[in-house]
Image (cartoon, helix red, strand yellow):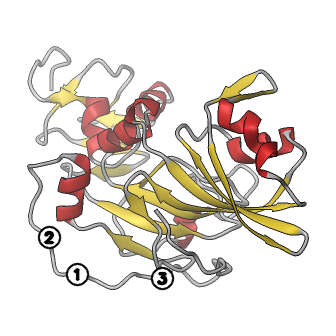
Amino acid sequence: MSMENQTGDRIAKFLARAGVASRREIERMIAAGRITLNDKVLDTPAVKVTEADRIIVDGKPVGAPEKLRVWRYYKPNGLVTSDKDEKGRRTIFDALPDTLPRVMTIGRLDLNSEGLLLLTNDGELKRKLELPATGWVRKYRVRVNGYPTDELFAPLRHGITVDGEHFRPMTVTIDRQQGANAWLTVGITEGKNREIRRAMNAIDLSVSRLIRTSYGPFQLLTLEPGEVEEIRMKVLRDQLGLEKLPEDPPAQKPRGFKKGAKGKHPPKRRNQT
């Protein structure tokens, strides 16, 4: 294919839709010489491709983009949310069922956090749903050590700056005191690196457990650690405003994770939103 071809999609967009990675990551992969187009190593993202082109990523051929799909996944504690980990720790991709196609995470959860993680095979949707402009609230059940009062959380509700980084206002409610620990419900709209833990540390509270219960309109519900369940097309159409989606396949039960990926059950959840 000629580099001047003006048909098709930019290769970063094409591969993002095919579930390879986000556009930005694909551009880094091109710069690293990891992508071959029609038997030639690609050195620029300024090229358009079609389904007729032969694209190889890390030695593996990439087919045409599949229909958009999204899954709910209960990420267990102790797994890294990345393709590979430089420290050799297990990642969620080591634990996901082999029956899933190539998927990407929408947002992240850190090593010691658990709960709802959305997965998709579409890089364009990933990018859209991660943008702060989407305005989706992420809700968490948070266990902290101590006996906090409602007034203590005023700085978090107004927006707090930690180590020079500003966090948007959070919603914080105290659910119950359990011995020397308190359970909170916390809502955030950005999800910066370790945002809740760092914000709690700034008001002298230590987080001992953090469970994401919802990401925008999508909820953890009854998923158990390690389980994954596809979100039905009707729900995606209703919640994402995506009209040109195929009909739902027959419903399937949630699938478990691979042997060796351990996760603990969270406490019973009440009235999650």
- Cα–Cα gap, marks 2 and 3: 21 Å
**Upstream in sequence: badge 2 or badge 3:** 2
Res. 119 image quadrant? bottom left
Residue at 27% from the left image edge and 30% from the top image edge: 11
Q: Amino acid at mark 3?
A: Gly
Res. 236 image quadrant? bottom left
Q: Which mark is residue 256?
A: 3
Q: Amino acid at mark 1?
A: Ala
State if disc 2 and disc 1 touch (CB < 8 Å): yes
- Foreground mark, 3 or 1, reads 1
Residue closest to the eye, 104 or 27: 104
Q: Name the quarter where the N terminus is drawn.
A: top left
Q: Residues within 10 Å of mark 1 (few under 14, many from 20)?
A: few
Which residue lies under the disc numbered 1?
A: 251
Q: Which mark is residue 269?
A: none
Q: Residue furthest top?
A: 4
**Can residue 38 be seen by looking at this rendering?**
yes
